[in-house]
Image (cartoon, helix red, strand yellow):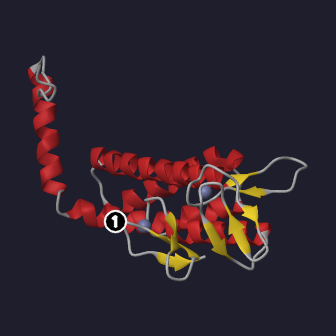
């Protein structure tokens, strides 16, 4: 079985539409990445800012506001309605991806039981909670690092770094112990983000 078969077009109308589609994409191919990049940059910052201020319950409102803003922006730039929709769809799927990534980071890093003291999940293994030691932190996975911050401060540091990386990149930040210093660092394999915690 060939799993990469071309789609089958049942009518000449479908065929024609497809051909128009391809032609349009080729025609716009040079301008689109530039436009898309510009909008991505602009709205990635805006989304991260908005998300810092609002809770997830506002997400749908934010998304619909964003959709409206994007639509206005695109109308000014380009009068091809189909193309507008194409770019809009792409941007909105980016937006959803950023949201999902942000939520995933929050969920994996913070365990927040109601009345118990907050636990911070080990950022390296993302499986076990960190245990406070005299001069640092310890995890069952074997991770051990020195740090003067208390649990809450550490949690907020981790959060700040995740957010500031997220402004620039859609990939997840990786945490690791730098062997020579024994300190906790993070870096991204996709962009050049690198920081100590
Ligand atoms: Zn661990
Ligand atoms: Zn990155």
Quadrant of the image occupied by residue 190: bottom left
Say if residue 136 shows up in the picture: yes
Q: Residue at the right extreme?
A: 115
Image vertical order of residue 53 relative to residue 11, above or below: below
What x and y, as percent, mark residue 72? 45, 57
Residue bearing mark 1: 37
Residue 155 left/right relative to 74: right
Image vertical order of residue 149 relative to residue 7, above or below: below
The C terminus lies in quadrant: bottom right
Residue 81 left/right relative to 62: left
Image vertical order of residue 74 relative to residue 154, above or below: above
Mark 1: secondary structure: helix
What x and y, as percent, mark residue 53? 70, 63
Image vertical order of residue 154 relative to residue 172, above or below: below
What x and y, as percent, mark residue 192? 39, 75
Q: Residue at the bottom extreme?
A: 181
Please give the name of the residue rendered at 45% of the width and 49% of the height, measured from the top-left corner.
92
Please give the name of the residue rendered at 64% of the width and 49% of the height, measured from the top-left corner.
107
Say if residue 62 shows up in the picture: no
């Amino acid at each position: 079985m060939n799993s990469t078969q071309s789609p089958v077009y049942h009518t000449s109308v479908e065929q024609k539409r497809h051909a128009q589609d391809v032609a349009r994409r080729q025609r716009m191919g040079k301008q689109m990445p530039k436009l898309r990049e510009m909008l991505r940059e602009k709205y990635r910052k805006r989304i991260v800012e908005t998300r810092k201020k609002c809770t997830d319950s506002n997400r749908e409102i934010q998304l619909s506001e964003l959709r409206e803003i994007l639509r206005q922006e695109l109308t000014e730039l380009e009068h091809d309605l189909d193309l507008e929709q194409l770019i809009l769809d792409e941007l909105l799927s980016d937006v959803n991806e950023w949201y999902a990534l942000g939520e995933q980071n929050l969920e994996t890093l913070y365990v927040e039981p109601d009345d118990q003291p907050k636990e911070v999940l080990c950022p390296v293994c993302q499986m076990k909670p960190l245990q406070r030691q005299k001069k640092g932190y310890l995890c069952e996975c074997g991770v051990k690092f020195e740090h003067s911050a208390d649990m809450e401060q550490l949690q907020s540091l981790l959060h700040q770094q995740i957010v500031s990386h997220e402004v620039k990149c859609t990939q997840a930040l990786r945490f690791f112990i730098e062997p020579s210093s024994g300190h906790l660092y993070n870096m991204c394999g996709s962009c050049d983000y690198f920081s100590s915690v």
